[in-house]
Each structure stands twice: as structure tokens, then as C-alpha cells.
Amino acid sequence: MSQNSDTMRGIPPGILLIRSIRGKDWSLSTYRYVILLVTFIAYTCYHASRKPSSIVKSVLYPDPNKGNGLDPLFGKVFVKREFGGNENYRIDKGWAPFNGTDGTSKLGEIDLAFLACYSLGMYVAGHLGDTLDLRLFLTTGMIGSGIFVALFGMGYFWNIHVFGYYLGMQMIAGLFQATGWPSVVAVIGNWFGKGKRGLIMGIWNAHTSVGNISGSLLAASVLDYGWGWCFIVPGVFIAVGGVIVFFFLAAYPEDIGFSFPPNSAPNLEATADDEEANIKKGFIVEGETKTVRRIGSVSRTSIGLIQACTIPGVIPFALCLFFSKLVAYTFLYWLPFYLSQTEIGGEYVSVKSAGNLSTLFDVGGIVGGILAGYISDKLNARATTAAGFMSFAIPAMLLYRKYGSISHNANIALMMVAGLFINGPYALITTAVSADLGTHSSLRGDSRALATVTAIIDGTGSVGAAFGPLLTGFLSTKGWDAVFVMLMICALIATLLLSRLVIAEISEKMCKPVPVSSEQSFGAPASQPLLSDQR
């Protein structure tokens, strides 16, 4: 294959360089590991760049009715001083325009602006992701996000106190952030079949929590030098991630030379083993090269939003994610603020310690995402798994609110349990479910739907995510009990929205006949998974 052909097929320059140095190509398995790593890094960067706003909330709007306590769990390792690098600014005085009586409402409006633009941009980004080069699309989004996240932080150094400036930076950053999720899920769906997709994506989806943790630690580590650095450092982080994506992300197996045999679906809907075997057969069979149909990423056609919405399961899961993500993002944006303003074990934790302590919620989320993916693979029941986790999230949040203030250890344990049940279904729906529906059997030919379906589901979820932090900003002024009641009601609604799919999955399991002869192996299976057989 000539260099011109490589360029036209979109082979990343980093892979071309490695090929020239090694003198030979990587195997399919190696490429899959590289794809998992690069996309993991990419979305870790996305989430890391979203976390600073939650860390600095208590700095922009400090509670005048409490002192700055120390958390004995972290001690002075994390708390060095109470003054920022800007002499005109004190942590205990806040930062105009957020330090007034309506400070929490303004902070909620900032979150709403970001998430509203993020959710609206998601629908457009999903369609563009199925139309444009995913590698370049993702690179542009990451670098653009880095620029505007950093510009928000520059307001500290430029001494800007105009609310419209911060609102505008968040809105533009939200539009660029919308490029991320549809793109990375589409890439993973292109490279992996459905056989173990739940477990693979459950492990891979740890990037969400790893990003939250790394973003919290990055922001907290530079908080002493001024809150502006809390945005600039993550902004640089995601821009560097965009460069890595440009050099090493191959969006489609076909783009680097792997091909599918004639009459095979390029959407990888076969089981994992069959799909991998088919790709390898399309490349070399018993040492003999076969003539195969090559399907480059540029030859596929995308489907429209309306057509994608008609895929069975898309609307119920999208509505479920509306409420599920509302709960998850409320914790993402407000948990550090809640910890810094809630008495735990008879004392308050500092702003910096609250940011570090909140990362343990995401540690529970990592376990929850992996566990949900594994269970859904074993049961072959995505809806039942998601609904089960969401229902357990209700008592988990109740216990956290009621007993989390008893001691630091109780707070940590209950926080991690809540993170497990809240992030589990959120991770499952935005990864394995979206990929399943994006490669649904109702799609025919070379249609692209992965990014579009992912955008519909996660875009709808992001609308809910926008309302959660906004409502919290208003309800928190009336007491945190009101916030937790709102979150538990949303978790209940999310569970009920999947009830029809849960009933269908259970009925399918109960009615599934046991094969009695080998003839069935040559015909259509008696029963197919819910997500792949509904029409």
C-alpha cells in the first residue's frame, strides 16, 4: 500500500512512523489495546477538564457561617495555606460576581450553561462524527475544549468580575466537549464485537471516574496558587491529549488495512470470536491472501436523527439516562461543595480536602461500571442490570445523607457505595447499550449509526445533567435534604422508565426453549438478546 493510499485512508501519522521504524505492522489484538488506551486517555482528559468548577465552588462562594476546618484524614499534606497567589483575593472572601447572596444560583447557572450547550451540541456532534473523520473531529474538540477551559481560568489573572465572561467561556467549552463521547464510543464500537462488550466497556469506562479523580487532584494541587490554575492545568492536559489522539487513533479497522470478508457487516455485530475471526480471514487465511471487499471509513453513509430514534430501545434508554445522568452529574459538580459545607464527625473539611475526599465517590464508580458491565454480559440483560443498580442507588443516597455525617470513615464508605450504584447504570447505558443500539440488526448495509445513537442517548442524558446542578443550586439554599429528595425521586423515575424493557427481558429468559437437536444450530436461534432482536 502506497503512502498516498495510506494518507487517503486516514492512517494516523504516529502509526505510520511506528510501522516505518519496526518494518512491520501490529497485530489486530495489539491495535485493539492501542485503541482502548488512546480513547481511555482521551475521555479521561475530557472529564478531568470538567472537574475544576466543582473544586473552586467553595472558593468562589465561601460559606461565611463556618470556619475552615482540617480533615484529619488528609491533614496538612493537602492543606498548606488559606491565601491564593493573587494579593487582591482571599479564599475566605470569594470572587465577584459569585460571592454575593445569589452566589450558589450563579454557580448553578454556570453549570447549566455548560451542560445545556454540551447536550445540544451532542446531537450535532453525533451526526458529524458519523460523517467526518473521527480522529480529526476528536482532536479538534479536545484542543478547542482546552483553550476555552483555560480561558475561564484566565479570568483570575486578568481580574475579570463580569458574569457574562465566565458564562460565555463555559458555553463555548460545552460545545467543544460535545465532540468527545459520541466519537470515542463509536471508535470502540467499530473495533469490538458484542460478545463481551459490556465487560470491556465497563472496564474502559473507568476513564470517567479516573478523569474525575485526576481532575480533582490536579485542580486541588494548584489551588494554593490561585483558582485560575485549577482551569489552566486541566486545559493544557486535554490539549495534550488531543495531540495524542491525532497521532495514534485509528477510527476504523479498515483504515489501517484490516478488511471484512464479502457479505459481512462492517458494524461488527457478530460475536467477539466470530468477528475477530472474520477480520483475520479477510486479511490472510492459511498463508494465502484472499480478495476481499475493503470498506474504508469514507465510504459509509450516516443515518439521520429521526431514523436513529426509531431503533428499538433508543428512546427508553435515552429517557432513563436523562434522570440517571442528572443524579450522577449533581454529585460530579456539587459533591466537593457539599462536603466543604457539611459537618462531618463534628468538624468541617477544608475546600482542598473536600476536593480530594470527593474522588472516593469516583473510586466506587469505577467498581460500579465494571460490575454493571460484567453482570449485564452474564445475564445478557442490559435493561435489567441498569434498572437494578438504579433502584439500589435510592437507599444508598438515603443512607449517605442520614449517616454520612457521623464520622469520616462512615462518610467514605457510604460515599463509595453510592458511587457504585449511581455510576454503574450511567456507565452501562452510555457505553455498552449505546454501542449495542448503534449496531442494531435493523440497520442495513454500510450505515453508520454508532455516533448518532450515542449522541441521542447521551445528549438526552446531558439535558438532565444540566438541570441537576441548576436545581441543586436553588434547592441547596433551602437545605441539603431537599437536594437528596430530588435525587432519589429522579433515580426512581429512571428505574421505572426501563420497566417495559425489564419485563421483556425477564419474559424472554423465562420463555427461552432449550435446544433439543443440532438442527437449530443451522437456523435462526430461538431467542436473541433484547437489544439485538427488537424491530
Image: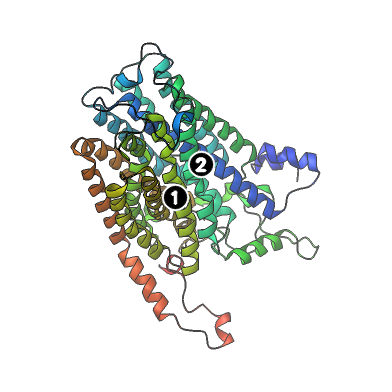
Residue positioned most to the left = 478
**Would you say the residues marked 1 and 2 are in contact, meaning their CB atoms lie under 8 Å apart?**
no
User: Disc 1 or 2, which lies upstream in sequence?
Assistant: 2
Residue kind at label 2, given as amino acid type = Tyr
114 relative to 66 in the view: left or right: right
Disc 2 crowd, CA 10 A, few/some/many (<14, 14-19, 20+): many
3D distance between C-alphas at marks 1 and 2: 18 Å
Q: How is the image coloured?
A: rainbow
Name the residue that disc number 1 marks. Answer: 364
391 relative to 32 in the view: left or right: left
118 relative to 101 in the view: left or right: right
Name the residue that disc number 2 marks. Answer: 43
135 relative to 406 in the view: left or right: right
On the image, the x and y values in percent for residue 473 come to 25, 35
Residue kind at label 1, given as amino acid type = Gly
Residue positioned most to the bottom = 516
Of residues 411 and 441, the one drawn nearer to the viewer in this rendering: 411
Of residues 303 and 493, the one drawn nearer to the viewer in this rendering: 493
* Element under disc 1: helix
On the image, the x and y values in percent for residue 335 come to 35, 39
Task: Single out the mark in the foreground, 1 or 2.
Answer: 1
* Element under disc 2: helix
Looking at the rendered structure, the number of numbered marks drawn on it comes to 2
Q: Quadrant of the C terminus?
A: bottom left
Q: Is residue 261 visible?
A: no
Mark drawn on residue 488: none
Disc 1 crowd, CA 10 A, few/some/many (<14, 14-19, 20+): many
On the image, the x and y values in percent for residue 393 come to 34, 55
Question: Which residue occupies 23% across, 49% down?
Answer: 485
Q: Is residue 145 visible?
A: yes
On the image, the x and y values in percent for residue 207 come to 51, 45
| Res 59 → quadrant | top left
